[in-house]
Image: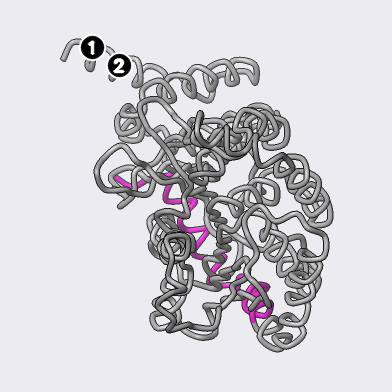
Amino acid sequence: MRECASIDARTRYLVRGLGDHLTEGGRLRKLEDLCGHLRQHPDAKGVAVKNGGIRRLLRILTKTNDRYVEYEAREALALLGHTFPVKGHGIRLLTIDGGGVRGLVALEILKKIEEEAGQPIHELFDYVCGVSTGAILAVLIGVHRSSLDDCEKLYRRLSTQIFTQTTFRGATGLFMKNSYYDSDAWTEILKENMGEMSLIETARNLDTPKMCLVATSANTNRIQAHLFRNYNLPYRVTGHYQGSSLPKLWEAVRASAAAPGYFSEYRVGDLILLDGGLFVNNPTAIALHEAKQLWPEADLQCVLSVGTGRHEPIATTSESSINWGTRIRTILNSATDTEGVHTTMHDLLPGNVYFRFNPYLSDEIGLDEIAADRLAMMMEDTSLYLRKNEAKIEEAVRALVKSKNPLDRAKDWYQQQSLLWPVY
């Protein structure tokens, strides 16, 4: 109890120290102290909010000309669960499925969307959610704002680098370390390409969309989703899913893409984390739930769900064909199915709001496929699918680019003023 009282007192002291009398240098030091305190004591968020933390931070943003002060203030607001208004008429969601090297399919779809919209992908969405390979794309596009062409080059290079090895070495790794491929090398690749920045630090840039990466927690006898967020939920809002915002970007991606058998599990603190696709390989429902926690009063403007391709094999009734390998593949395919979520979203959301793009592929493409001819076939299937669905893509883009009307801007202004100058 005494320790809690001390933490609360420290929180009140740090919040009340954010006065108008400070110099820019003084503000920066105070903000750094507050952010460090909130990272160390997440439960102090309530005390900070009740003592006017959000109001004081927003006032700092309206007055400062120092970009470093702005960065720290935005991070502090994210730690307190504050969310700025959406940039369009309503919430615009992007979700990207898992699928290993088939992330190239998702990239091709996003290229078409970007081309039709005439804007970079990261500017078109308020919220981005990815699982496994989709988590990699979410970070590259949403945080690093890499061009889609650069993302494709990186994908092809890293796929060849990590998925090229002898069967003997793979079998040995699977037996000794529960991973067919070199998990340590994969970790180093992610450190280099995803970055050492923590998730919550990405909130410093106002252009970075809200983002979550989905992993699977295996600590209990029933798996459940664990969300790596670059935001905290608002004060007094309790989400359905457990999550964290303090791990580094590469750690979040490493956990989300820890496909069993391919790579070893990843630990964050006491959590044992596996590939998010084991819980849900299509994260649209999770993203929708999270977005409504952040913007409960906002309408849905566009929900864009991007798949990584699917293959529907011809059913067989031959009993002799159902060997153990087939049974295991059937179980894994069922566990990572994406179309069940799609069916639910399709039934619940209006047709001019929800759009799903997931090409049919001529053959089954594994997560670790690197053969040039099979990848070329996959990309040709994707191009054919996009040509057939041009009208649907144009409709999705029209939904995405719808801008705020005068009433939307008036609501945003009123909300901002009510936070800056609350009436008690």
Q: What amino acid type should be assigned to the residue bearing mark 2? A: Ile
Quarter of the image that includes the C terminus: top left
Of helix, strand and loop, which one carries label 2? helix
Q: Within the magenta stretch, is there residue 397?
A: yes
Rendered residue at 34%/41% (across/down): 218
Horizontal side, residue 324 vs residue 129: left or right = left
Q: Nearer the viewer, residue 158 or 301?
A: 158
| In front of the other: 382 or 414 | 382
Is residue 413 among the parts visible in the rendering?
yes
Residue designated by label 1: 3
Which residue, given by chain and number where applicable, does mark 2 sit on?
Answer: 7
Secondary element type, mark 1: helix
Q: Residue furthest front?
A: 320
**Which corner quadrant of the image does residue 172 belong to?**
top right
Q: Which residues are magenta?
A: 396-424
10 Å crowding of disc 1: few (<14), some (14-19), many (20+): few
Q: Residue at x 71, y 66 (%)?
A: 110
